[in-house]
Amino acid sequence: MSAGQGVPPAEGHPGGLDAAEAGFREQVRALLGEERVRRLAAEIAAYPPGTEAAHLDVHRWLGERGWLAPSWPAEYGGAGLGAAEAAIVTEEMTLAGIPDDVHVLSIDIVGRFLLEVGTEEQKKRHLPALAAGEEIATVLFTEPDAGSDLSGLSTTARRDGDGWRLYGQKIYNMKSQYGEVALCAARTTDSPVPMHGITLFLLPLRSPGVHVEPVPALCNDRFNLVVIDGVRLTGADVLGEVDNGWSLMNDMLQLERTGVDFHAKARRLLDLVIERAAASGRLADPAYALPIAALDARLRAGHAMAWRQVRNLGANAPDPVGSAMAKWYVTEQIRPVLETGLEVCGLDGVLSAWDGAAPDGGVLEAGLRLGPSHRLASGTSEVMLYLIATNGLGLL
């Protein structure tokens, strides 16, 4: 099994991909297999410390075909396709070694919010540029004292004439130093019910009063602290209804969770481990072959779970419990994949991309530093288990 080929076109759905979907996967895979993309992926992997991927040519190349956001209507820069094609692009980009943070933030999160609840003016202002890979959008939800429980956020939007002035701090967000706009949650009304009174704003990140500074992190891409000091926004910057942000965040972030993106990351890592094991002769040793085979089976099961959620989205029948199950199951496989990779690669596996002797461009070492974040991003494993226990099993 070669790297990048661990997700066959028909895997993950009882009926497989139909002919059009399978053909679309082959087209996307062909584009991402071009020399210019392979060269770009190698350059990104070798970026020195303090350098990270943001505006990428490959986003523009996909955007020229309407493939960066393939499920969006053509009038907004998409291709008018469906949830399956969107999932295929996510998978193939990850398998090709293209970092997915910008795509997830700009297209899967902010773009989805805009499509679902944005005004026509907001859609025309942002969606075509996002779909073309020309603009980056990011998310400002988490705060120093409000992490997984966003009902505890303290960023405030104070009334100022016919608009608001925002004050507060957001932390652990990514790409804000490059972004043009951010989806920012702020409290517009004091209420004894903490979930009430939160509003979503489209915050121009290059406004006076927005300060972005790095926060130390283990991964290549930096986290940011964003300080918002009196930025004035108007009704045109409100996304959805005033005071209804909690409901929107709760509903829309569930749609983000299919597990497809996390599965692709785990799949790419395991494919590289398989290649290393085969090259060293360890794949013939049951001590290595059996754990690898077990991991391969788990990832195929996780892929089936994730694609069930994709099909649910395509049918406009999202399953929040099923999405939580898929996200939890897939992300829990990444740690054993990394541990098996260390068993196969030995000390070579901890060489970074900045060491010329690092196998596979230091992908395993980067994965070791990034690995813990998968259990946190898009909802922690503990929150996923809570959702499964309460909404699915009725245990609490």
Image: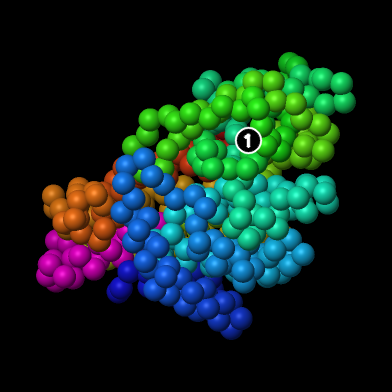
From the viewer's side, name the closer residue of 380 and 89.
89
| Mark 1 lies on residue | 206
User: Can residue 118 be seen in this snapshot?
Assistant: yes
Q: Quadrant of the C terminus?
A: top right
Q: Quadrant of the N terminus?
A: bottom left
Q: Which residues are magenta?
A: 264-289
State the residue at coordinates (61%, 28%).
Answer: 210
Q: Is residue 6 above or below residue 246?
A: below
Q: Which quadrant of the structure image shows residue 307?
A: bottom right
Locate residue 389: give its quadrant. top right
For residue 52, side relative to residue 128 (left or right) = left
- For residue 278, above or below residue 312: below
At horizontal 39% and vertical 73% (from top left) the residue drawn is 35
- Residue 262 percent coordinates (x, y): 45, 54
Q: What residue is rendered at 65% in x and 41% in y?
A: 181
**Residue 132 x/y as whole percent:** 63, 61
Q: Residue at x 59, y 83 (%)?
A: 19
